[in-house]
Amino acid sequence: MTRFDDLADAVLAGGAAGADDALDVLRATDDELLPLVAAAARLRRKHFGNTVKVNYLVNLKSGLCPEDCHYCSQRLGSQADILKYTWLKADEAVEQATAGLRGGASRICMVSSGRGPTDRDVERVAGMVGALKSEHPDVEVCACLGLLKDGQAERLRAAGVDAYNHNINTAESHHDDIVTSHTYADRVDTVNRAKDAGLSPCSGLIAGLGESDEQLVEALVALRDLGSDSIPVNFLMPFDGTPLEGTWELTPGRCLRILAAARFVCPDKEIRIAGGREMHLRSLQGPALHVANSIFLGDYLTSEGQAAEADLELIRDNGFVVLGAEAADAGPDSPEDSDSHDPSKRRRGAGTDLPANA
Ligand code: SF4
């Protein structure tokens, strides 16, 4: 038994992990990493079994945002070479969402850049959600449109939106170091508006923004107190052309510890490995899935993810099933299920004129 097992026992018995416990998790040694994952996995299994929730992002409007979030490739003045376009049409949005559903997603996240929607924007998104739900009645829709004003959350709820995402992103004590065009209180206000309107609140963070361990824990405790149902944990992808260009603070092990801290602080909430999964967790994506219970399929808002098939393989290889497809996908693939049985033949290195693969 490690102290992380003791902590898991205490949380499983109904206790809450405190800030000191979360700090201890963040500071686990490399030797303790696997026992930490095993302990956090007990909480994950209790609340989510062997399922992984698969989410799919549709960027409805990309770039050209007037806000100044330092981490964001879509911010005011960003020189990042990203796609920039205005609102997708409803049929384009439905087409994109349908691709995600075909890939196994059960939640579609409809996102737009900007400080917040106008009432006209809300109507536009309401129309898209109506069109999507008439074709796919079971789909869960999360909207992420920025800061909400009076009546907008209620309108989205009435249109069939299930959840609203607005990340707090970082600790209140660090917020003003990463954005000045709106406040931490603005962000919290929008999460509360969503909650009050009956939308499931989705709010998470970005790690690697120069925050301290204490600030990471502060953000996690704030998310618990805010009652966030789903918690996307992003790992900063420092785009060239943004103020955080060249900020590389994360290692795969650090990311794993952050996810474990999130699981201990919010044991029964959906912990989603979000942007930066492939870049920062690298070969530890598998162990991370034993702690988190949710991922995005395929691409992110302005960056490409690994192939959707690799995401599904990650889920199967680690013994999980896609939430909603449990019956059809009752366990890890057997070797016979693989499309390709024939090892790819070496044509480089020794015995050839080509350089070795090393
Ligand atoms: S995070 Fe949102 S509000 Fe901030 S710059 Fe990016 S798109 Fe704009």
Image (cartoon, rainbow, N blue to C red):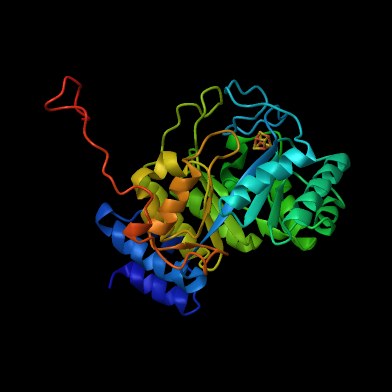
For the residue pair 301 and 24, the one nearer the viewer reads as 301
| Nearer to the camera, 276 or 97 | 97
Residue 335 visible, this angle: yes
**Quadrant holding ligand 1?**
top right
Front-lying residue, 45 or 98? 98
Identify whether 328 is placed above or below 349: below
* Residue 346, image x, y percentages: 21, 33
In this orientation, does residue 257 appear? Answer: no
**Residue 84 appears at what percent x and percent y?**
67, 26
Numbered circles on residues, count: 0
Q: Position of residue 221 (x, y in %)?
A: 55, 59
Name the image quarter holding residue 36. Answer: bottom left
Quarter occupied by residue 197: bottom right
Query: Could you say which is closer to the camera, residue 109 or residue 270?
Result: 109
Which residue is drawn at the image coordinates 11% and 26% (left, top)?
A: 351
Q: Residue furthest left?
A: 351
Identify the residue at horizontal 60%, vertical 42% (top origin).
Answer: 175
Residue at 29 percent across and 69 percent down: it is 2
Residue 6: x percent and y percent? 35, 73
Q: Quadrant of residue 358?
A: top left
Quadrant, the N terminus: bottom left
